[in-house]
Amino acid sequence: MNTRSMVLSLMLSATAVGSASQALAVVPPVDGRGVGAVARCWAATPGNPATQLPVLHFDKIIFMVSTGQLLPINPADLAALNAIRRLTELDIKVKDDPKTVADLKGKVLTFLGAQPTTANRALIRIVDVEYAVICGL
C-alpha cells in the first residue's frame, strides 16, 4: 500500500470512528509546565494483589542555550540564570501529561526560572527528547 492510499485509508477510518465519538475532534491543550498525568495502573504489592498506582510519564529534554542573556521570572535570579553554560548540551527531567501537546521550550524555560518570552525561546535549542513511563508509588 503506497503512502497516499494509507493516508486515505486512515482518514476514512478516522471519519468512521469520529462519527461515533466526538473525542477525536477535540484538539489537545498545550502543556508548557510538565504537570503529571492523571492515570492509574494495577500492580501487586505485599498483601494486596490488585493495587491501583499512578502512571507517571517523564520527559528528559536535552537542550542547549545559545549565547545571549536570558530574562528570569524573578529579577534576583538574573546572575544565576545567566551563569548556565552556553553552547553545551544540558538536560532536565520533568513530569509530563501524555494527553497534552508539550511546549518543550516552555518547559525548559519554566524549569530554569526564565520568562517564556520570544527572546528567551530563541536562545533555547531542543536537541532531543527521551521519555519514560512508569507505574509509580
Image: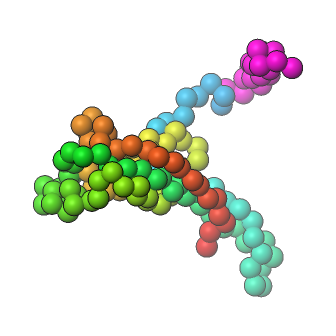
Answer left or right for 123 relative to 101. Answer: left
Can you say whether 47 is above or below 119 in the image? below
Residue at x 66%, y 66% (from the top left corner): 135
Residues 128 and 45: in front is 128
* Residue range corresponding to the magenta coloring: 1-22
Residues 107 and 1: in front is 1
Q: Give coordinates of residue 74: x percent, y percent.
A: 17, 56
Q: Which image quadrant for residue 120?
A: top left
Q: Main secondary structure of the magenta part?
A: helix
Residues 47 and 104: in front is 104
Q: Quadrant of the C terminus?
A: bottom right
Residues 82 and 14: in front is 82
Answer left or right for 104 relative to 3. Answer: left
Q: Which image quadrant for residue 45?
A: bottom right
Q: Give coordinates of residue 56: x percent, y percent.
A: 59, 60
Residue at x 71%, y 62% (from the top left corner): 41
Q: Please, which residue is most extreme toward the bottom here?
A: 47
Q: Give coordinates of residue 38: x percent, y percent.
A: 58, 55
Answer left or right for 14 relative to 82. Answer: right
Residue at x 47%, y 46% (from the top left corner): 127
Residue 81 on the magenta segment: no
Residue at x 72%, y 27% (from the top left corner): 21
Q: Give coordinates of residue 47: x percent, y percent.
A: 77, 85
Q: Quadrant of the N terminus?
A: top right
